[in-house]
Every structure is written in structure tokens, then in C-alpha cells.
Image (cartoon, rainbow, N blue to C red):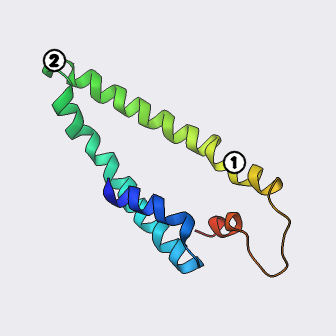
Amino acid sequence: FMIASAAFTLTPHAPSLPLLTLTRCFFAVGAASLGTTIPSLLSDTVLRADKGKGSALAGVASSFGAVFAALVLLRIPSIVERAAVPRIPGVMVPIQCAYYT
């Protein structure tokens, strides 16, 4: 959790494309490890008789989250870019940098 939150915090402050790529890679590692914490949290919070239902609910919620991210959240940069600040020749805006990572 700390890896993902630190990378999420540092990503907007990356001054160059290589550092932006590095912070995005750290965030990906942290996000992947967050997916593996769900079963351990279920074993601590769900009753023994309901663990199957809890696992199924966690899987369905994770799937819906992935679909929501793909269909809604990935469109936000293009919407923001259309309403963004005027372009400066030769300078990439942060949204353009995000497309390359």
C-alpha cells in the first residue's frame, strides 16, 4: 500500500519523462500488490461460512472497477486536454506526458 500511495503522490511532481515513467512503474507494482491483499483481508473480516460469497463479491467488484476505469477514467485526460491551457510550442503539457507512460 505504501508503494502505491508514494508513487501516486510523486507522479504529478515528476519533472521529466523518465522520472514520470519510473513513478508510474512503481505505482503499477503497488497496484498489483494491492490486488493480492484482498484475500487476506477477506479472511480477517468475513465469517467462515460466507468466505465464498465474499470472494465472489470481491471478484465482481474488482471486475466492475476495471471496466469503469477502462470506459470512464481513461477518457478523462482527453476531456481535460481539450479544456486545458493554451499550448506552448516545443513544450509538452503534463497530460501529453501521461499518454507516453
| Residue 90 versus residue 57 in the image, above or below | below
Front-most of residues 4 and 28: 4
Q: Secondary structure at mark 1?
A: helix
| Residue 79 versus residue 90 in the image, above or below | above
Q: CA distance from mark 1 to mark 2?
A: 41 Å
Image coordinates of residue 87 in percent, x first then y, are: 84, 69
Image coordinates of residue 42 in percent, x first then y, are: 23, 32
Q: Left or right? Give the position of 40 relative to 79.
A: left
Amino acid type, mark 2: Ala
Amino acid type, mark 1: Arg
Residue located at (28% from left, 29% from top): 55
Q: Secondary structure at mark 2?
A: helix
Identify the disc placed on residue 88. Answer: none
Front-most of residues 77 and 62: 77
Q: Give the residue at mark 1.
A: 75
Q: Left or right? Give the position of 55 relative to 44.
A: right
Image coordinates of residue 100 in percent, x first then y, are: 63, 70
Check if mark 1's residue and mark 2's residue have beta carbons within 8 Å: no
Image quadrant containing the C terminus: bottom right
**Pointer 1: residues within 10 angstroms few (<14), some, or many (20+)?**
few
Identify the disc placed on residue 49. Answer: 2
Image-quadrant location for residue 45 = top left
Image-quadrant location for residue 71 = top right
Residue found at the far top of this picture: 49
Residue located at (32% from left, 52% from top): 1
Image-quadrant location for residue 91 = bottom right
